Amino acid sequence: MAVEDYYSVHPSSATKVELHFRHSPGDGDAVAAISAAEDLVTSEQVHAMIGPQTPADVEFVATVGSRARVPVLSYSATAPPMSPSGTPFLLRTCADDSFLAAPIADILAGLAWRQVVLVHEESRVGTGIVPALADAFRDVGVSIAGRAAVPVDASGDRLDAVLYRVKSKTTRVFVVHMSWSLALRAFHAAKKADMMSQGYVWISTGGQWGEDRLRAEDIDAMQGVLMVRPHVLPTIQAANFAALFKARLNQEKAGSQAIHGPTVPMLWAYDTAWAVAAAAEAAAISMTAMWERLLRAVLDTTFDGLAGRFKLVDRQLQMPAYEVVNIVADGTRTVGFWTEHSRVSEDTNPRSPKGLKQIIWPGAKSPSRVPKGWAVSPSGRDLVVVVPVKHGFNQFVDVSSDQSTNGRPRITGYCIDVFDAVIKSLPYPVSYQYVPFNGSSDSYDQLVRLVPQQKADVVVGDVTITSSRMGEVDYTMPFAESGWSMVVALQTGTRTSMFFFLKPLTASLWLASFAFFVFTGFVVWVLEHRINPEFRGTPLQQLGLIFYYAFSTLVFAHREKLESNLSRFVVIIWVFVVLILTSSYTASLTSMLTVQQLQPAVTDVKELIRRGDYIGYQEGSFVPSELKKMKLDESKLRSYSTPDQYAEALSKGSAHGGVAAIFDEIRYLKLFLSQYCDGYAMVGPIYKDAGFGFVFPKGSPMAPDVSRSIVSLTEGDEMALIERKWFGDPGSCDSQGSGVAAASLSSWSFSGLFLVTGVASGLMLVVYLATFVYRERNELRAAEPGAGIMSLRRLRAWLQHYDRKDTRSRSFMGLNDDGSLRNNGVDANKTNGSTCDIAAPPPPAVRSRLVDSDTSVAASSPEEEGTNADRTSFEQRTDKAAVPFGQPSLKSLFNCEDKQDHPEICTNQSAN
């Protein structure tokens, strides 16, 4: 039909293709295929051969063609290409089966299936696709859980045996790559084996399939199957050809009831014949032309055929688009397409939604939820979950007898609750039963080996994830923290440091305290220096006073009288801080001196090795193998099973039948320390491990789901609630009390107090300086009239002025800077004829100052020393100071009753 159609479209063609037909059985009979090809080459002297009809004969025909240098155009050579050097004249005008790998892999990835079983024909055509599938599956994270090769001539019993073997696996996704006839037999056998029910997934390569070639019984057996086949565009030319094809077939087979439309390989055959005719015309080939010229012409031929674009690259047709077909009760329905650029989508339009449409899966009557792709238990029984029988640390797994369970053991514990919560959170139901295992006391390796030995489906317990075990099984994500270390006994320590008194406070607190002592003393000195004679003197005296006054507050021995309210406020705040600081220091020092100080007996593994001490571990643990790697003597290792045994062995010590240290995982050590708070401590480095995990068979599809559930539980509150149920609150302890002395006080503990006193002192200092600058602004301006605002000369003038006495203060009123009395008042009074103001007694501070500076005053009588010492000293001082100026002494003024002394003054007083 193709040649006829070509010349009807091109009636003026200069060449004419003549067809010669030879029949080949198509069952891989090499003799028949080679004989037919040899006959065409020798008898008919053909310039090209099209065919054969089946892939099994392609290799034989291609060999004959290459030897005779005759091009062979095969529309059925879908198997991966043979060596180009062996068949240089073979042109593949069909799609390579390896192209199917990418669409199938994308479908599996899109539906979240991670394992498949490959069922293929046991032939070169069937096995040729396996490497391509393996590579494509690996790229999307899908693994091949098993392969089943079915012979082309397999009997019914052989088919059943193959299917029952793959049915025993947990994987329920099957990829089928077989010839038309063998695939039909396989699906009918699967129907009988109850493998076309819910939960199963079948994906078939359907290049040779046509929906009108399926009988009713075939559709019934294949309901729910997905077929991936090359997509043929529904063009007018293809529709017309299908109608003509059926009409001619009906004419040639009059009375036949099975009239089918053309399949995709038939369309490829049509395009191949058209390409030969077009190439012959383009190359103007005559009967005596060279065959190589025809070969080059076919390779250069390009046109839009019935099956799509015809263009050979590397001597084969390029990757086409693929159609995904779902077999349903009334035939087939297209659920998606695949192209190299758009991948899997609902339509060939690039903007169409990604993924497939709703699919009717095996065992369903309507579109339903996507099967998970694997079975929890292939036989449908409950999962056998093995748990270890522990003699200690039963908080993790506890196996006990319970009469309420009809003699069956009662299994509880932290690991059990976690596993139950994880299984409950899975998106599908799982039935399981716990089975105790008594042989785990020696090593958990025996427990783990039950899974690869198929004696257990899952192992649940405090099983540590190790690299040696991962070679045989799959672990889930860890559900408990990782790491292992050692616990040792504490012993009484002795203190030999002479500076132990410094230990109650940290170095930072000592420095901070010293700084605030100095700062407070400086602030008080600044506030009192100008108005208080006790804060004056030489520079060294004043510096010493700053330190003396501040540190005397430690014992509240400061006796200097303060004149300023600002300094009084500063000292009140500071004394409060000192009171708290000294009280805290005393309490901390007392605690350190009275509480027994305990120290670890050993802190380093190397010290254990050097001393040759005995070391303990938990029975069944992986820790001994790790200790041997540290070159510990195996004869020095002792196993224990309960926390009580741990405590007893550590208390005895290595020299008295016990051990110096016990190595175990952190979970067990924390549990031990929570029961035995006093006398033991976890020391040394923490050695990392992978933590506790659940054990599943190698390649189990359930393990990733369980891992996701573990992560989900960890992110929520349920895992914390389970831990609190079995281990209590973090840091809780059954026996209260601690043998460890109090820690040193840190500066952070007193930062609030330091902040208060610092702010108070700083604020008072700012207030004083602002007041000083404001009151003395005129004197300072007069002292340095030409100085700039910020010059050194002005600063020096300010400092010099600050160092002077404030004569307006009560302490220095009536005195000059050198301590002498001012005379301007006396002269003025004399001028006015009055001396009463001079006779007024000066302030007590002035009298005290005068007494201190007078070295020539006679001693007072004993009777006066007690009550009138200040008064007598002051009078003597003022008498001496008044003599050089010819003025009466203050003593005479105070005793005006005696009119014999200075009668003129007393007369003036009486007159006034």
Image: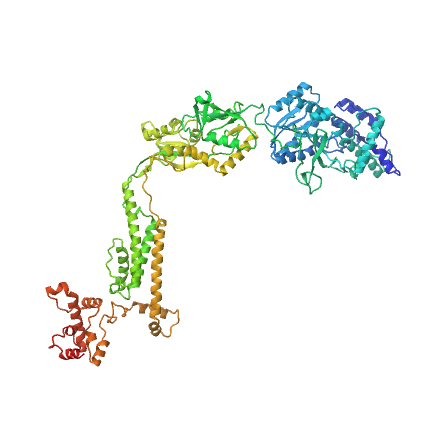
**Residue 444 pos. (x, y %):** 46, 26
Quadrant where the image shows the N terminus: top right
Is residue 371 or residue 46 the one in the foreground? 371
Q: Is residue 187 left or right of residue 514?
A: right
Residue 50 visible to an observer of this rendering = yes
Query: Residue 485 occupies which quadrant of the picture?
Result: top left
Q: Position of residue 163 (x, y in %)?
A: 64, 23
**Image position, residue 698 (x, y; %):** 55, 28
Write down the quadrant of residue 192 in the picture.
Answer: top right
Which residue lies at the image location 16% right of the left edge and 67% below the top edge?
871
User: Is residue 121 found left or right of 69 in the rendered image?
Assistant: left
Q: Residue at x 52, y 37 (%)?
A: 712
Quick check: 106 left or right of 540? right
Front in this rendered view, residue 880 or 311 = 880
The mark tally for this picture is 0
- The image position of residue 379, as x and y in percent, is 58, 23
The quarter of the picture where residue 644 lies is top left
**What quarter of the picture does the C terminus occupy?**
bottom left
Instruction: Please determine whether, in this image, residue 764 is positioned above or below residue 604.
Output: below
Check the image and tell me how it is coloured: rainbow
Residue 688 visible in image = no
